[in-house]
Structure formats: C-alpha cells, structure tokens
Image (cartoon, coloured by chain):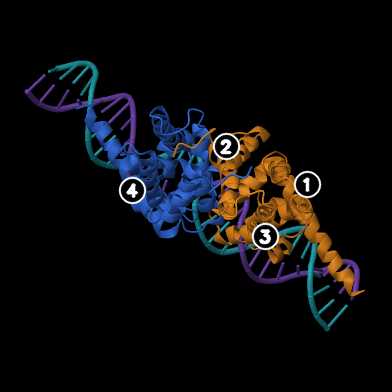
Chain colours: A orange, B blue, C cyan, D purple
Amino acid sequence: MTDKRSQRAADRTEAIMRTTLELGQEIGYAKLSIEAVAARAGAGKHTIYRRWPSKGALLLDSLLSLNEAGLDYPDTGDIVTDLRVQIHAAVDLLARPPFGPLFQALIGEAQHEPQVAAALNERFIAPQADKTVARLRAARDQGQLSPQFDLELAMAILSGPLYFQLLITQEPLTHEYVDRILDALFTGLGPTHAY
Amino acid sequence: MTDKRSQRAADRTEAIMRTTLELGQEIGYAKLSIEAVAARAGAGKHTIYRRWPSKGALLLDSLLSLNEAGLDYPDTGDIVTDLRVQIHAAVDLLARPPFGPLFQALIGEAQHEPQVAAALNERFIAPQADKTVARLRAARDQGQLSPQFDLELAMAILSGPLYFQLLITQEPLTHEYVDRILDALFTGLGPTHAY
DNA sequence: ATAGCGGTACGGCACGTGCCGTATTGACAG
DNA sequence: CTGTCAATACGGCACGTGCCGTACCGCTAT
C-alpha cells in the first residue's frame, strides 16, 4: 500500500486544517499562532511548515477545504432568482459566523501578503466570479438581458458593494441589502433615469 | 507660553507620523515595527505608545494627517462631471503610490483590529460617503435624478467595485474603469433593460 | 534503510513595560 | 524680578515574554 503513506499525510493535513479553523474561531485569526495550532493538533511545527509557507496560506487552505462543494448557481431559468439564491447563500457562508470572521481576516491578510492575495484570487474569487459571469451570459443569450449588457461590470456591481460592507463599513450583511442591489442592477436606482 | 509645551508635543507627534509614512513606504507596513519608527524618528518607544495604542492607529493618524485638505467635490452643476473629477482624484491618491499601498494595508489591519476599523470609518469613510451622498442629493433636488433615486445605494455602487478591485482582485484601478461604473450607474449596463 | 512524524531546544526579533537621567515648564518664595 | 523646585515629557536602555522559523533527536511505519 503506497497509499497508506499518503493517507497518513492527508490525515495530518486534515487534522491541522481542522484545528486551524477551530482555534481561529475561538481566539481570532490575529491571535492565532502556528505554535498553538501545532500544540492542539498534536503536530510538530515542522509538519506545518512543511506544508504551508505562512499562517495566511494555512488559513486559505483550511477555509477552501470547507468549500469543496462550491457555491454553485441554480438555473431555474430566471436570472434574478438564480442570482438571489446564490448570493444569499454566499453571504450566509462568508459573512456570518462561524466562518465569516475568518474569511474577513483572510482578506485582511491578503493586503499584507501578495502571495495570499494571488492564491485567494486564483482559487476562490476568480472561479466564483466566472460562475456569476457565466450565469449572466446564459441569461443574455436567452434574451433576458440586452445584447450589450456588460457582464463583467455587472458582476463587479453585485460583488463590490457587498465586500465594501463586509470589509469597510463592517455592518451586517442582510438578504434585504442583496435584494436592493439586485433591484438596482436590473431595474435601476429610481423609476426613471433622468440622465 | 503654555503653547510651547504643546508645540513641542505637536512637533514630536508630527515627526513620528512623518517617519511612519517614510518607513512604511520603504519597507512596507507588514515589516514596519514601532521600534524602527522610534529609532529613525529619534524618539523613545514610550513617546509613541503614549500617543497611539497600536501600529494601525499610528498609521491611520499618519495617513489622515495628509488629507486635512480633504477630498472635496467640485460643483459644476453637472453631477456626472463632479463625481468623475472627485473619484478620479480619490483613486489617484488612495490606490497609487506613494500612499496607495499604505491605505491598502490600513484596511487590511482594520480586518484584524475592530478599533482601527471603527476609527477609519468614523474619520474617513463615513465623511467621504456623506459628501458623495450630499452631492447626489443636490443633483436630485435639481431634477437631474429621479426623485426616487436611491442615494445611499448609488454611493455603494460607486465605491464598492473600486474597493473590490483594490482589495480583492488587486488589479490597477484606472480612470477608465471609474468611467465605466459611472456610465453604468447613470445610463445602465446596456442600452435597454430587458428585465 | 528511509521518510515523515512528535517533541524539544535554539537564536532572533519585536512587543510592551519599567527605570534612569535630562531638559523644559509653570508655580512659588524670597 | 529672580532664584528654586516639583512636575512633566522626553530619549535611551534593559528587561521579560511570545512567537517566529530552523535544527536536531528518537520513534514508527513502510
């Protein structure tokens, strides 16, 4: 069994990531130390350093391991309904306990470590954005949106205000706010556009 | 001269903040230590800790001391022009060297330190948002925007995508992108709204 | 035999807090 | 008006602490 070796390694990896999430939720990412993770996981520090180059990279992997299922879009045929369902789910997962604070801290860390930022983008942000754009494109192809509808910008207008509220004003993100953005995006900010 | 005392104190404060910005630009906020600031500023660490409770608070004050003039809106009578001019200036200041990286790092720190987040909001984000909303309200009062135009949401749709690009995708923020957002906000994402 | 492991120890760095002696200041006494 | 003095903030230094990232040591499973 050459798999037994890699199985043991995978077990260690999984135990360390699970401990990272546990401890992170308990004491917060800022106070989290690799020493403490190693101690609670019953692992040597070297075992952690062999796998991850930094605390941020460890948290990134730990969080992504939860999301292997992915935040996928339904396709009921109605673009607004599908966006609504998906974004509500994303907000619930990423902006609320237990994992919201850790996701927020991870983005904070990405401001100091370019490698974390790049990995976060490549492995989570970009795929998620691609899904949104793909769903919008399907709607456009079906005639639900104007042929000139700017898909990339629509994605940014959907995501931007949510991240703004999560990271900057740090007020609670509600489903009602998501609906307001969707409404503005597809019906406008007022009944008529004067400009 | 009871002012002489406070004058000396103000001089020290100013010297420390200036050194913070200098060192921060040279080695980056992550590697910045209060010890190093104290050493270069020719100050004792106590003198810094007496004034600021954390590295984040020190950077916040240091950056805000640059912006005493404020990022104010012109009022040419045309809302889109005024927004354009103001946001272009804000992007140039906050998303480009020399101070862009430090502003970015400050927001990162705000994800770990709630006090920094609160102070950043209270002393910069909220006032700036208020100015934007006030300028939009003036336009609405003048009939340039629909009476039902959602001012707060418009502000979020203007700011959100910019912060998203600054903090998440971390791609360069261009004036052209600002214009795209303005265009979408006031004329829609496509020539017609199908929904 | 080899590789990965838990455990321990290590040097290094920055933190935040004392303590020291000094300089400036305003209050007070002569 | 003048000399003295307590108070205050300061620069500098040293300390203990915590965590970093690395190195080494047996142990175990392959």
Task: Give the residue number, with chain letter if any, for mark 2.
Answer: A170
Is A157 positioned to the left or the right of A179 in the image?
Answer: left
Task: Give the residue number, with chain letter if any, for mark 1.
Answer: A76
* Of the pair D5 and B25, the residue shown nearer to us: B25
Q: Secondary structure at mark 1?
A: loop
Task: Give the residue number, with chain letter if any, for mark 4.
Answer: B18
- Tag in front: 1 or 4: 1
Q: Residue at x 57, y 37 (%)?
A: A170
Q: Position of residue B60 (x, y in %)?
A: 43, 42
Question: In the rendered structure, are the residues bearing label 1 and label 3 in contact, judged by CB atoms less than 8 Å apart?
Answer: no
Task: Give the residue number, with chain letter if any, for mark 3.
Answer: A123
The chain carrying label 3 is: A
Q: Is residue A54 visible?
A: no
* Of the pair B177 and A147, the residue shown nearer to us: A147
Three-letter code for the amino acid on which mark 1 is drawn? Thr
Q: Secondary structure at mark 3?
A: helix
Three-letter code for the amino acid on which mark 3 is drawn? Arg
Q: Position of residue B71 (x, y in %)?
A: 35, 41
Cα–Cα gap, marks 1 and 4: 57 Å
Chain-order first, disc 1 or disc 3: 1
The chain carrying label 4 is: B
Cα–Cα gap, marks 4 and 3: 38 Å
Cα–Cα gap, marks 2 and 4: 29 Å
Q: Residue at x 66, y 57 (%)?
A: A130
Chain-order first, disc 2 or disc 1: 1
Label 1 crowd (10 A; few <14 / some 14-19 / many >=20): few
- Tag in front: 2 or 1: 1
Q: Residue at x 78, y 56 (%)?
A: A68
Label 4 crowd (10 A; few <14 / some 14-19 / many >=20): some
